Image: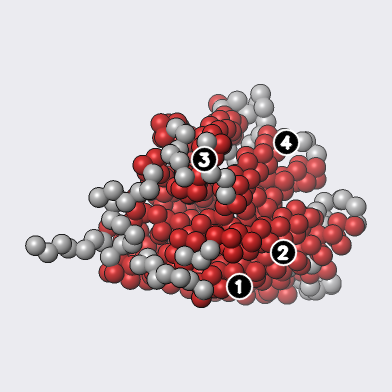
């Protein structure tokens, strides 16, 4: 059964499938780290904590990139009303990126990091050793090649087809993603300067250009599931991305507070970071408003649930929990504590993991030849996955927030010698870490339910 509007959209399927495989890996390594927090070495030294953390965070980034690429290959042809410029190039880039990703993760797990740096030529062009950017230089170069081929394919598709606001916002976000990744190749010897430019990748991805990608995907799905006029949704999209870019770019300053930069960054960072929740709140209003004004009852109820959930969780994680510790006088005490981890977990899940699962929920029935939506039983299972993962993430965030507040109280607020040391404080936080681990197991069960829903099909009667 052919359910795709354009046959070249089928190249999105391997990207989505591989993204979910990596997502499972990310969660498994997260659970391993959670146990290492409270038990210590439970795998006989085979996977040290620093390696597990490196794999956990790198899998997060790579699976999201695969998800974004799959989303682009699905929605750009439909928005442009033309076939993808080169499906063969898209599949070739998939295999190159997948092979590079697997080889890099195996390198982390099987080779000491210093040895990996030596055998991959880091001495010739030092780029390794920084959080989230631990990839060998050769892998980073491969990512650039894949990104250039990817953008070329999408750009040529758009040039020969219709130009829409969704396509243009999506491509702008993807170009920004590629451009800001180039700062990963700049590795100054001065640590403060290194951190200054490191945030050009990390912050301007997650609080800048990735928000454009999220906005475009959300707008595309809402148009499809609600039937609301494109003009209405595009106006909302323009407002949201403008607010996100203005607040997000200058909001980079909240990472510069303690990097020996001029003091005005404390004011700039605080003020514009305080504005950052507004575009996310606008996204909540936008999503619920569009669903309330819908002109059709789309059979894919699960995709609608994911779209609404994305807006709410992105607002809570990126907006509310980001604001909790973004003002300089507060950040002075909370910087680098478990409050940061609480914000990071909910923000990444709410803003980016959920938007990838939103487009997958909408697109996979079509990519699998089923039709507009999975059967009712599959959708119920998928919704169970949604609620288990989302509620579990809320509790992970609350437990980490509790740990962070207690950490600040015990370790950083006392001005005299009464303050506990870092490790003594960690001992006091063990109950929160155990609770976080339990919530993590529930999250994994939810993810399994989400994935299982794709294997449930309706039995046909004669």
| Horizontal and vertical percent position of residue 32 | 46, 57
| Residue marked by disc 1 | 285
Q: Nearer the viewer, residue 126 or 166?
A: 166
Marking on residue 187: 4
Spatial separation of the CA atoms under disc 1 and disc 4 = 41 Å
| Horizontal and vertical percent position of residue 188 | 77, 36
Spatial separation of the CA atoms under disc 1 and disc 2 = 15 Å
Marking on residue 34: none
| Horizontal and vertical percent position of residue 106 | 45, 38
Name the element at disc 4.
Answer: loop
Spatial separation of the CA atoms under disc 4 and disc 3 = 40 Å
- The residue shown at (47%, 34%) is 85
Q: Furthest-left residue in view?
A: 462
| Horizontal and vertical percent position of residue 145 | 56, 30
Q: Are marks 2 and 3 in contact (CB under 8 Å)?
A: no
Q: Earlier in the sequence, mark 1 or mark 4?
A: 4
Q: Is residue 287 visible?
A: yes
- Left/right placement of residue 240 relative to residue 59 reads right
Q: Earlier in the sequence, mark 1 or mark 2?
A: 2
Quadrant hosting residue 143: top right
Q: Earlier in the sequence, mark 4 or mark 2?
A: 4
| Residue marked by disc 2 | 276
Q: Earlier in the sequence, mark 4 or mark 3?
A: 3
């Amino acid at each position: 059964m052919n359910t795709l509007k354009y046959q070249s959209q089928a190249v999105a399927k391997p990207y989505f499938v591989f993204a979910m495989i990596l997502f499972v890996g990310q969660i498994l390594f997260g659970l391993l780290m959670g146990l290492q927090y409270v038990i210590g070495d439970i795998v006989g030294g085979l996977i040290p904590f620093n390696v597990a953390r490196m794999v956990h965070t790198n899998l997060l980034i790579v699976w999201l990139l695969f998800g974004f690429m799959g989303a682009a290959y699905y929605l750009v042809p439909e928005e442009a009303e033309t076939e993808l410029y080169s499906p063969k190039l898209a599949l070739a880039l998939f295999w190159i990126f997948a092979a590079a990703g697997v080889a890099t993760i195996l390198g982390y797990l099987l080779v000491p990091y210093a040895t990996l740096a030596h055998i991959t030529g880091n001495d010739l062009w030092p780029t390794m050793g920084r959080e989230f950017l631990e990839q060998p230089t050769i892998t980073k170069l491969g990512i650039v090649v894949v990104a250039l081929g990817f953008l070329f394919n999408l750009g040529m598709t758009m040039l020969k087809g219709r130009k829409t606001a969704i396509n243009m916002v999506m491509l702008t976000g993807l170009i920004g993603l590629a451009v800001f990744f180039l700062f990963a190749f700049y590795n100054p010897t001065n640590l403060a300067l290194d951190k200054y430019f490191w945030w050009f990748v990390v912050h301007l991805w997650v609080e800048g250009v990735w928000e454009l990608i999220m906005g475009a995907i959300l707008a595309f799905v809402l148009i499809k599931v609600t039937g609301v006029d494109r003009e209405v949704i595009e106006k909302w999209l323009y407002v949201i991305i403008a607010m996100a870019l203005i607040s997000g770019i200058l909001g980079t300053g909240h990472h510069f507070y303690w990097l020996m930069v001029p003091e005005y960054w404390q004011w700039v960072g605080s003020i514009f970071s305080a504005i950052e929740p507004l575009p996310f709140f606008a996204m909540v209003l936008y999503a619920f408003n569009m669903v309330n004004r819908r002109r059709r009852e789309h059979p894919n109820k699960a995709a609608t649930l994911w779209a609404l959930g994305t807006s709410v969780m992105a607002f809570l994680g990126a907006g509310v929990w980001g604001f909790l510790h973004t003002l300089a006088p507060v950040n002075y005490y909370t910087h680098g504590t478990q409050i940061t981890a609480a914000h990071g977990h909910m923000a990444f899940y709410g803003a980016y993991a959920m938007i990838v699962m939103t487009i997958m929920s909408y697109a996979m029935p079509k990519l699998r030849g089923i039709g507009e939506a999975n059967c009712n039983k599959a959708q119920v299972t998928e919704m169970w996955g949604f609620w288990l993962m989302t509620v579990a993430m809320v509790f992970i965030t609350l437990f980490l927030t509790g740990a962070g507040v207690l950490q600040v109280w015990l370790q950083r607020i006392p001005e005299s010698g009464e303050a506990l040391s870092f490790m003594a404080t960690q001992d006091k936080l063990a109950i929160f870490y155990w609770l976080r681990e339990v919530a993590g197991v529930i999250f994994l069960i939810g993810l399994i339910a989400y994935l299982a829903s794709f294997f449930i099909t309706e039995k046909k009667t004669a």
